[in-house]
Image (cartoon, helix red, strand yellow):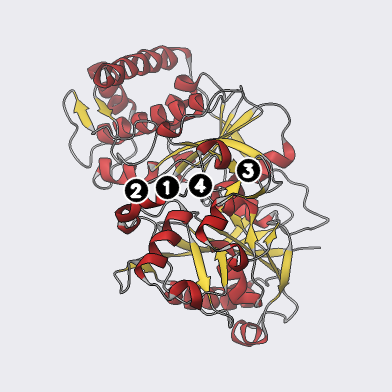
Amino acid sequence: MTCHVAVIDIGKTNAKLVLVDRASLREIAVITRPNTVLAGPPWPHFDVEGHWAFLLDGLRDFHAAHGVDAISITTHGACAALLDAAGDLTAPILDYEHAGPDELDAAYAAIRPPFAETGSPRLAGGLNIGAQLFWQFDRDPGLRTRTRHIVTYPQYWAARLTGVVAMDVTSLGCHTDLWAPQMGAFSTSVDRLGIRDKLAPVRRPSDVLGTILPDIAARTGLRPDTPVQCGIHDSNASLLPYVLERRGSFGVVSTGTWVIAMAMGGRDVPLDPARDTLINVTALGQPAPSARFMGGREHDVASAGAYPAPTARDIAQVLEGRIMLMPSVAPDTGPYRGQDAAWLGAEPPVGSGARGATVAFYLALVTAECLSNIGHSGPIIVEGPFAQNAPYLRMLAVAAGAEVLRAAGTTGTSAGAAMLVAHAGAVSPVDTQAVPVDAADRVALQSYATAWRAAVAAREA
């Protein structure tokens, strides 16, 4: 029996709708639109109405062409929606990159719980949902009263589809300051913010919240009994297939606008919030040591435009010439926060394969540092766009000293989100392929990695 799952996947850069065959986890169709941020008022916010029209049209077209049996949802984190009693937004959904919350940093610091309680470092702008809410309530004194429900972002879309409000553990565990992952409960900040009675019920990502509303069925042609899952944070969607199918120690690197490294069963190491480490929460409710940097954004800024796939000659030029990019291209994030990017050696021209190779090596070395900082051991699975970047994968294997597996598929989160839908025929694991590194390449890459790390250490001294 076939089961086609329509996955709503809202990333920071793009919004996607993906149709996944639940049994094979094969992607049948994918459509995308830019996740454009609207300027305001009252603050920069996401174009949810544009997304909504796009998603409804896509559901209609997917159902007409292939059939849709269920809907699952995955989104980026650091995002909350404030709803009134009717389920409508009481204020636009804040773009977490907006610097507004930093205006009240000192006042917010006085009420936020310690890292030991939340596993959540203090981050810039609105990257902590607690900081968002603190600033929004200050900017709009009537907002708290108007708000009946606070939901995390996957459940905003679930509420629009079903009329049922909820939050999920993975979104709450994404550096919100609102969750205590070791306790599996809300942190002390919810009472300090005065929002405990407004927080929607916490559900498992795999829970079925309900079926689509009648007007959604009429608009899309989907069956009125089409179920909608609660939903999941995107990096945790990438992690889920491996949590379910693997034993022992391993790491997953979810790539997109953000690169999120997650370690399961690794070494017990102290997490340093100054290095952008944190504790995520898996779909099964388990704490997962994690580290992150804005790798996709850094790739786009550093490459400064399209480039051809690096050739062997391009790579040799970079390795032999010790052409290096120093951290950090996005200095507010990652293990080298606060450092300014710089080129060592002759900066390759924009649009060249050599520049693409240098940027790939940089991203792999920062990823390896993230994995080291969270005690990773065992194989590393790379999900998302970077799984198609061969120089990145080879350097990561050498720099991390581990086997690297690249996951198939264009959207690394879609398989995990589809797996939230129970289906008796779903037995296929995610397709992965080992990344080969021959002996000669390994020596050259290791020499480069050693030199890069020494240069970084010299700049930090």
Name the front one of labels 1 and 3: 1
Judging from the image, what secondary structure is the residue with disc 1 in?
loop
Asked if disc 2 and disc 1 are in contact, CB closer than 8 Å, the reply is yes
> Real-space Cα distance between discs 4 and 2?
18 Å
In the depicted structure, whether residue 328 falls above or below residue 162: above
Identify which residue is drawn at 36% across, 29% down. Answer: 361
Residue type at mark 3?
A: Pro
Q: Is residue 137 visible?
A: yes
Q: Local crowd at mark 2 within 10 Å, few (<14), some, or many (≥20)? A: few
Percent x, y of residue 64: 63, 78
Judging from the image, what secondary structure is the residue with disc 2 in?
helix
Who is closer to the viewer here, 196 or 235?
A: 196
Judging from the image, what secondary structure is the residue with disc 3 in?
loop
Q: Which mark is residue 106?
A: 2
Percent x, y of residue 343: 20, 29
Q: Which mark is residue 181?
A: 3
Q: Which mark is residue 140?
A: none
Q: Local crowd at mark 1 within 10 Å, few (<14), some, or many (≥20)? A: few
Name the front one of labels 3 and 2: 2
Q: Is residue 94 visible?
A: no
Q: Which residue is mark 1?
A: 110
Name the front one of labels 4 and 1: 1
> Real-space Cα distance between discs 3 and 2?
25 Å
Identify which residue is drawn at 34% across, 48% down. Answer: 106
Who is closer to the viewer here, 335 or 213?
A: 335
Q: Earlier in the sequence, mark 3 or mark 4?
A: 4
Asked if disc 1 and disc 3 are in contact, CB closer than 8 Å, the reply is no
In the depicted structure, whether residue 449 falls above or below residue 41: above
> Real-space Cα distance between discs 3 and 4?
10 Å
